[in-house]
Amino acid sequence: MTVNADIHAGGNTWRSLPAAQQPEWPDHEALRDVIAELESYPPLVFAGECDQLRQRLGAVARGEAFLLQGGDCAEAFDAVGADQIRNKLKTLLQMGAVLTYAGQVPVVKVGRIAGQYSKPRSKPTETRDGVTLPTYRGDSVNGFAFTPEARTPDPQRLKRMYHASASTLNLVRAFTTGGYADLRQVHAWNQDFVRSSPSGQRYEQLAREIDRALNFMNACGVDPEEFRTVEFFSSHEALILDYESALTRVDSRTGRLYDVSGHMVWIGERTRQLDGAHIEFVSKIRNPIGVKLGPTTTPEEALTLIERLDPEREPGRLTFITRMGADKIRDRLPTLVEKVTASGAQVAWVCDPMHGNTFEAASGHKTRRFDDVLDEVKGFFEVHKGLGTHPGGIHVELTGDDVTECVGGGDEIFVDDLHQRYETACDPRLNRSQSLDLAFLVAEMYRDQ
Ligand SMILES: O=C[C@H](O)[C@H](O)COP(=O)(O)O
Ligand SMILES: C=C(OP(=O)(O)O)C(=O)O
Ligand SMILES: [Mn+2]
């Protein structure tokens, strides 16, 4: 075996371990063919970009930057269109501009985008009117429609995921480097939000300050070219290990393994078993890694995760994304942060205020209250302030469209409105105006800090 083959084999050590939440593919030969084809495809990202993001996240871990990570719960193949991608990106960039001004630190912008096609589920099946079918596991696995054909896992979908990710990333790169995302333009969109939406008016003061700051920079003669492009990274949950490992390659510069399906990948709350395949898989790759930590996480688990995933204690390598729930964060987070800090590890702490706050409305819609989302972020800031540690960022499920999936917000959505534009394939997302609300309110929190 050559050295390279040896290293490459390292990307397959997960295969002997239990892997939670994997699809039951009916045809294993077809799966093998798909994996072989995926292995021949070019990388979606360059390993050097993953290193760049790891460095940026290092600044987050050291308290010198803030992470904004967001996008759909589940991307869908039929939503790979220019409008949807542009609206999502626009929303994230607008949030980023507000947070940068408020925090006076760089905001690292990472989309749940160009690869977020696979979903872990709480139940393996779904029953409607006495008919039981496999649960929807994301467009990478099966279809959303409630028919036996759609719900049967089809490995050909893994190739569609690759192509959908490639076209999405291509457009994102074009927008972020081609001038569309110019900071002055992003600020103009924010001014428009403040002017035209009833909820936006309370942020007038902040928007005016940003305007003055931009004018000041202009007057000082800052090169306008500096504003033209923006750094933006992709991320998704590394769930379907056959796909992720088919896209794991040896980097020719360093000889190390990178999962080139996205810049950052994370492991979800349901697949972070210490002796499981997912943790083993990400322990072998050099990408920056996130791990979701729910309310039952013990400090010992967190410390073992650090040992497994960040043995060299490299700031930026490991991000803990806590998702406790608004009612638990003030109780559960302090011990975790204290014990991890005492161990000397420098992880980035990021708040996912979505996944601990989901409930089912009387109409049957899965939803979240904007106030709970906000309260979890508030709790997150309070805990870090109390401990003298850095609230490193937020991780949110959002869309740039005017959907009605979460209740509340400045342009209030009521439970009775949920049916109007409930379009998510999995979890409820903040819509465009709720996302901007959140950014302005977090900006105020950041300033108070
Ligand atoms: O996005 C996260 C999970 O896939 C989702 O919250 C699980 O939802 P379920 O309980 O409907 O399966
Ligand atoms: C599945 C998700 O979250 P968690 O693993 O935290 O439940 C998600 O981020 O969509
Ligand atoms: Mn989700």
Image: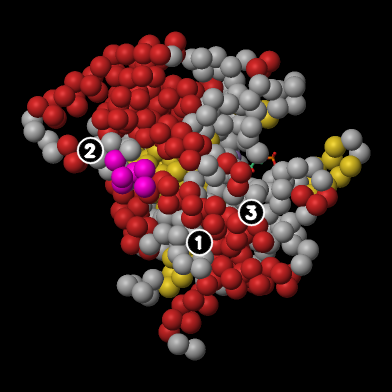
Is residue 115 visible in the rendered structure shown here? yes
Q: Please, is residue 355 above or below residue 18 in the view?
A: above
Marks 3 and 1 sit apart, C-alpha to C-alpha, by 20 Å
Instruction: Find residue 387 and report its horizontal and vertical position in percent.
Output: 37, 34
Q: Is residue 39 left or right of residue 133?
A: left
Residue 140's mark?
A: 3
Which structural element holds mark 2? helix
Disc 2 under 8 Å from ligand 2? The reply is: no
- How many marks do you count on the picture? 3
Q: Which residues are magenta?
A: 174-179
Please identify the residue farthest to the left as the structure is shown: 220
Marked residue nearer the N-terminal end (3 or 1):
3
Instruction: Find residue 82 and report its horizontal and vertical position in percent.
Output: 48, 40
**The disc labelled 2 sits on which kind of residue?**
Phe
Q: Is residue 192 left or right of residue 8?
A: left
Residue 282's mark?
A: 1
Q: Please, is residue 255 above or below residue 353 in the view?
A: below
Q: Residues within 10 Å of mark 3 (few under 14, many from 20)?
A: many
Residue 50 image-quadrant placement: bottom left
Comparing 157 with 19, the one in front is 157
Per the image, the residue denoted by label 2 is 227
Q: Residues within 10 Å of mark 2 (few under 14, many from 20)?
A: some
Marks 2 and 3 sit apart, C-alpha to C-alpha, by 36 Å
Q: Residue at x 23, y 38 (%)?
A: 227
Q: Nearer the viewer, mark 1 or mark 2?
A: 2
**The disc labelled 1 sits on which kind of residue?**
Val
Which structural element holds mark 3? loop
User: Which quadrant of the figure contains the C terminus?
Assistant: top left
